[in-house]
Amino acid sequence: MTFKTSQRICYVLLTAVLYYIPAMASPREDFERMQKEFQASPADQALREKIIKAAQVLKPPPVIPAEARRFLVRGQTLVKEAKKESDYLDAAAEFEKSIQIAPWLADAYFNAGVCYEQAGRLDQAIANMKLYLLAAPNAPDAAKVQDRVYSIELKGERQQKQKDEESRKQAEQTQKKAQEDTLKKLVGGLWATGSCSTARWDRNEQPRNWVCNLDEYKLGAHWWWIKEENNSNRKDPFIFPGDGTVEVSAGFTDEFPQPKIIGKLKTSYPIDLWDISWECVYKDGTRKQAWLGVNSDGKTSFVLSCSRQYYGDDLNFDPKARYPYVWYNR
């Protein structure tokens, strides 16, 4: 290959390359192209920031469209008249329309940020304030606006903490309501109720006799049927205080006053009376687990006592001692 041939080939290749490479767009043409793209995708945050930066290097700076100016003035007018949160949100909506048309407009971001702060939309306030600083990095109030962002961030953290606490309380209340509903299914309604001092229960929690000894029964000292005005011997002996627990409201005799007895679920999937844990709460704040006996079906009868040792062995049972019980049957 001769030198002239090689030179001719290089010339042809260079011509072809130059033919297929389009002319480079000017900064203003790039800016206008991004503007059109932004109108179609206003949620594109990266594109928004590119437009803001591109506007800063254009000489002369881009002209603010009349429509963008119109929405800016409308927003400023609404701010002057604003008295409540919804008023500030209405003003912010006008500034957002201005930003949609001219996303490099710094004043619109600042004003929108102020409105969102007044309306309690702190995340949106911070986002707009930061965009203002991006659009006007050399503004005289840039340092003050940055400090304002720090202040709003603190308010936002407190606001979120308050929301989290409210959500926690709501979830807790919902859980308590569900627990109460379950307890009502297990023990709510009418029960035949009585109390006795020495009824024996064996290790399998089955009653050996349902009443006290005959003499005590005749005296009526340690056995008591709850009676309503209509002489019915059935009553709803439980109250539900609304905290996910159940309290015994009747059953013991005056001769053997008992501490408050509180029941709560001990499993997430309760099926019978064994799934309720009962606790005796004394006036001095002392708490201990109540003795519990449940009949074989687990649903129609159970016995409570704060005096007898929980699940006490018959070897520890003193037949001469008085163990006050309350008995519920339906």
Image (cartoon, grey):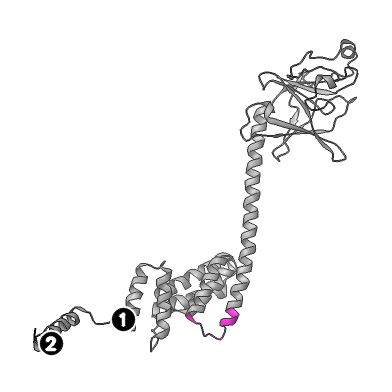
Sequence-first tag of 1 and 2: 2
The amino acid type of the residue labelled 1 equals: Glu
For label 1, the residue is 29
Q: Residue 301 falls in which quadrant of the image? A: top right
Q: In the displayed structure, would residue 270 be above or below residue 233?
A: below
Quadrant of the snapshot with the C terminus: top right
- Residue tagged by mark 2? 7
Residue plotted at (46% across, 71% down): 96
- The x and y percentages for residue 37 are 34, 71
In the rendered structure, which segment of residues is drawn in magenta?
135-145
Q: Tell me where residue 11 appears, x and y as whole percent.
A: 14, 85
Q: Which mark is residue 329?
A: none
Residue located at (66% from left, 19% from top): 297
Q: Is residue 267 visible?
A: yes
Please state if 213 lies on the left or on the right of 191 as rendered: right
Amino acid carrying label 2: it is Gln
| Position of residue 298 in the picture relative to residue 88 (left or right) | right
SS type, badge 1: helix
Is disc 2 surrounded by few (<14), some (14 to 19) or many (20+) residues within 10 Å? Answer: few
Residue 78 visible here: no
Q: Is residue 253 above or below residue 2?
A: above
Question: In the depicted view, which residue is nearer to us: 315 or 89?
Answer: 315
